[in-house]
Image: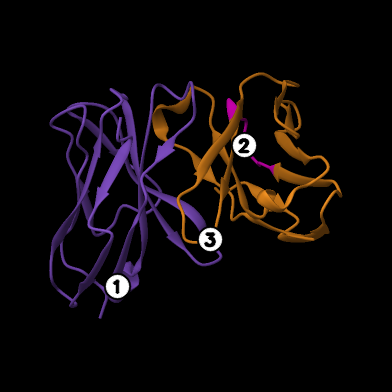
Chain colours: A orange, B purple
């Protein structure tokens, strides 16, 4: 079952912050985050392996609440280059041998 | 390193035809997967492999076959193409999920 992402779409001005949420109905081993620009392949941003773990990548960070089976992606002081579709991918307990299950994505548009 | 290489980039098939989408990686990754991406649906897992000689079905395997005779190659075969298989197909590989998945550039398939 696909994780649920919210919101479906966000429009921001350059410099504003955004939060994208990912929620699963199943227990999770880890959560991945990817960004995809139009016509291109998804690009790996980060993986969160432990409950409560937070990771950062430039001004993009994420948290993972293992108990609530939720993850959030935080984009701070957004830049034009952050535009794209963001996907979370989840792994069930037991690790990633079974492949990732992706959400439907969140479209992020950054305007000057 | 070339990363993950997919061929062809574009393909048009007639209903009932068969074809093989090629995927090769040169990073010595154990995990490989095939996804299809349709508008509004996110990325859905077709088949995956955790190593040479080992494959398994994902969420949407019907109409597709895979094999993994070497670590490097993971071809996807469409047995008898149907219009419902019109999609963008991505191959991805990972070293035991440590660094996330690296995606190929995709194959845009149209079945008429």
Q: Tell me the quarter of the picture where residue B108 sits.
A: bottom left
Instruction: Specify the quadrant that holds the C terminus of chain A.
Output: bottom right
Residue A38: which disc? Answer: 3
As drawn, B44 above or below A45: below
Q: Tell me the quarter of the picture where residue A73 sits.
A: top right
Residue A105: which disc? Answer: none
Q: Residues within 10 Å of mark 2 (few under 14, many from 20)?
A: some
As drawn, A11 above or below B100: below
**Residue at image point 28% right, 57% down:** B62
Q: Is residue B111 left or right of residue A94?
A: left
Question: Residue B87 appears at what percent x and percent y?
Answer: 37, 65
Q: Which chain is disc 2 placed on?
A: A
Question: Which of label 1 and label 2 is nearer to you?
Answer: 1
Callout 3 and callout 2 share a chain: yes
Callout 1 and callout 3 share a chain: no
- In the image, residue B107 lies in the stretch drawn in magenta: no
Q: Residues within 10 Å of mark 1 (few under 14, many from 20)?
A: some
Q: Residue furthest right?
A: A16
Q: Which residue is mark 1?
A: B110
Residue A26: which disc? Answer: 2
Instruction: Please name the predominant secondary structure of the magenta segment in the image.
Output: loop
Question: Residue A78 appears at what percent x and percent y?
Answer: 78, 47
Q: Is residue A40 left or right of residue A48?
A: left
How far apart are labels 3 and 2 at the CA level?
Answer: 30 Å
**Residue at image point 13% right, 31% down:** B69
How far apart are labels 1 and 2 at the CA level?
Answer: 34 Å
Q: Is residue A82 left or right of residue A38?
A: right
Q: Residues within 10 Å of mark 3 (few under 14, many from 20)?
A: few
Q: Which chain is disc 1 placed on?
A: B
Sequence-wise, the earlier of marks 3 and 2 is: 2
What's the magenta region?
A23-30
Question: Residue B49 appears at what percent x and percent y?
Answer: 29, 33
């Amino acid at each position: 079952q696909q994780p649920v992402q919210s919101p479906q779409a966000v429009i921001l001005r350059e410099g504003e912050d955004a939060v994208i949420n990912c929620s699963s109905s199943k227990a999770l081993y880890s959560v991945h985050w990817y960004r995809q620009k139009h016509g291109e392949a998804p690009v790996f941003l980060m993986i969160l392996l432990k409950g409560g773990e937070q990771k950062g990548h430039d001004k993009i960070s994420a948290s993972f609440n293992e108990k609530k089976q939720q993850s959030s992606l935080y984009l701070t002081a957004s830049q034009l280059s952050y535009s794209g579709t963001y996907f979370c991918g989840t792994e069930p307990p037991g690790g990633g041998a079974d492949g990732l299950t992706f959400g439907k994505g969140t479209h992020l548009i950054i305007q000057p | 390193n070339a990363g993950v290489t997919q061929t062809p980039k574009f393909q048009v098939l007639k209903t009932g035809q068969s074809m093989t989408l090629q995927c090769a990686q040169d990073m010595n990754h154990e995990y490989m997967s095939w996804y299809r991406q349709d508008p509004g649906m996110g990325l859905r897992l077709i088949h995956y492999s955790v190593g040479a000689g080992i494959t398994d079905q994902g969420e949407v395997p019907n109409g597709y076959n895979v094999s993994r005779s070497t670590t490097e190659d993971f071809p996807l075969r469409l047995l008898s193409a149907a219009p419902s298989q019109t999609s963008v197909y991505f191959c991805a590989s990972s070293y035991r999920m440590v660094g996330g998945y690296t995606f190929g550039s995709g194959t845009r398939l149209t079945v008429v």
